[in-house]
Image (cartoon, rainbow, N blue to C red):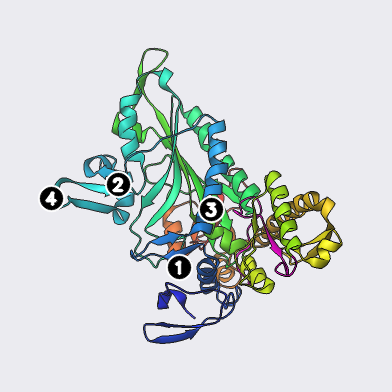
Amino acid sequence: MNLKKLKLKYYNPLIKHVIKNEGVNMSEQLGITVKKNQDFSEWYTEVILKAGLADYATTKGCMVIKALGYGIWENVQKLLDAEFKKTGVKNYYFPLFIPESILKKEAEHFEGFTPEVAWVTHGGDEKLSEKLAIRPTSETIMYDTFSKWIRSWRDLPLLTNQWCNVVRWETKATKLFLRTREFLWQEGHTVHATKEDADKQVMQRLEIYKKFVEDNLAIPLLNGMKSEGEKFAGALYTTTIEALMPDGKALQMGTSHNLGQYFAKVFDIKFIDKDEKDKYAWQTSWGLSTRVIGALVMVHGDDKGLVLPPKIAPTQAVIIPINFHENREVLEEAKKIKKKLEDGSYSVELDDREEYSPGWKFNEWELKGVPLRIEIGPKDLKNHQVILVRRDTSEKKCVHAINLEESVKDMLGSIQENLFNKAKKFLVNSITEAKNKEEFKKILEEKKGFIKINWCYTRECEEKIKEDTGATSRFIPFESEKTKGKCDYCEKDAKLVAYFAKSY
């Protein structure tokens, strides 16, 4: 069943029924119909659509982020924004439209984005005197303004961030959260008096990203430096955090760039330093997008649907009263449990819909990935107990009502830890060293994952690897690892150790 090809706009993911679409009769089955280990791509799409994270938009190449998906993004915003503000960053908002003359000011940067830029050529019926780009990223429009704001060393550092949407005119097939023409992100931009300050900023942001993703999304990461061929257009250097998906492909989860003085010289961002001399500023930029939601689905999801880590889940627990229409005291107790947990700062839903059976509700909430299910029926009420059910392992535990809050806390913590450890084990077991070109290709075909090699660090070799295998250099470790003579792929002199993989 290819949901994307059929372009199904409306369907109930849990009730069996027939849908007619473009002449095709199709019987929808209960829950997820594709096994994760059989057709990973189709499974991924089906989980997103049926769990209610997102849908395909009428606008080609775009998506609609639904309540559950946006709820996750709101938690990402809340948690990351708090970390940024602790370090003095303030939020701004800059225009969506960038005049062509401004975008073209920095040739390398502009060339890097040219194929992806969407242009506005008319305002109503009137042709514009200058084309406007819909921002693919905001360096140019922000830095043109920074040049007006910065005059003295006293104006530095300038620490800005904006939460916004960007447009990159992707021509490849749409993949929800991973490859769409419009997506949401945050982009931080800072200005400094010295390279040392800019370097510190780059690493500070990367560490914030790494801690956030590992602690909250329960996704283990590797980090390092991008190669010259893979760095951000116009940057002095780019640092990255990389995750590995269950299909063996890498996913770039966030980047932090030292932009050097290139943009400062183009946009004339100068300041009078303490020695009363004019100097060009040093700049950084850093970003993380809604693609992290795609990573959540892939890394933690299973054949029942979505599995959300408690720290990022919009709903951490769902309470399902059983046979409450026959015993209203069950519903009243469920309401008390909800209030008690909410008073303890947990996000909780009470599913008191009478038109659905408990079993139907169990399936729906499992599909949506809610970490913890709390069941209470007449017998439980009589025995002053509730049943807790973990989403990650399906383990059930009977707990006394008095111990409910403590048990919920412990179980949510255990779920968070288990999801991370499971993903960490997979990551560690998916790093393989290749000793030559043939071994490199064999690993990529049979095992996949990250391939570690002694590398010559030449653009020629990097392009050859990509051409031969489809793999790209993902990162160079910050801590230099000892090289052993020749490049494992082309047999030139090795200069460093690098990690390669196929990627999204």
The chief SS type of the magenta part is loop
Mark 3 — residue? 71
Give, as a single range, the part of the protein colored magenta: 303-327
Question: Could you tell which of marks 4 and 1 lies nearer the N-terminus?
Answer: 4
Q: Are marks 2 and 1 in contact (CB under 8 Å)?
A: no
Question: Could you tell which of marks 1 and 3 lies nearer the N-terminus?
Answer: 3
- Where 8 falls versus 440 (above or below)? below
Residue 317 painted magenta: yes
Location of residue 303 in the rendering, given as x and y in whole percent from the top left corner: 63, 72
Count of marks placed on residues: 4
Which circle, 2 or 1, is nearer the viewer? 2
Question: Could you tell which of marks 4 and 3 lies nearer the N-terminus?
Answer: 3
Location of residue 195 in the rendering, given as x and y in whole percent from the top left corner: 46, 29
Location of residue 132 in the rendering, given as x and y in whole percent from the top left corner: 23, 47
Residue 153 painted magenta: no
- Where 452 falls versus 78 (above or below)? below
**Callout 1: few (<14), some (14-19), or many (20+) C-alpha neighbours within 10 Å?**
few
Tell me if 111 is positioned left or right of 312 in this view. Answer: left
As drawn, the label of residue 126 is: 4
**Callout 4: few (<14), some (14-19), or many (20+) C-alpha neighbours within 10 Å?**
few
Q: How far apart are the alpha carbons under marks 1 and 3?
A: 41 Å
**Callout 3: few (<14), some (14-19), or many (20+) C-alpha neighbours within 10 Å?**
some
Which circle, 2 or 3, is nearer the viewer? 3
Q: How far apart are the alpha carbons under marks 4 and 3?
A: 40 Å
Amino acid under label 4? Answer: Glu
Mark 1 — residue? 468
Amino acid under label 3? Answer: Gly
**SS category of the residue bearing label 3:** helix
Location of residue 325 in the rendering, given as x and y in whole percent from the top left corner: 70, 69
Mark 2 — residue? 110
Residue drawn 58% across the image and 56% down it: 243
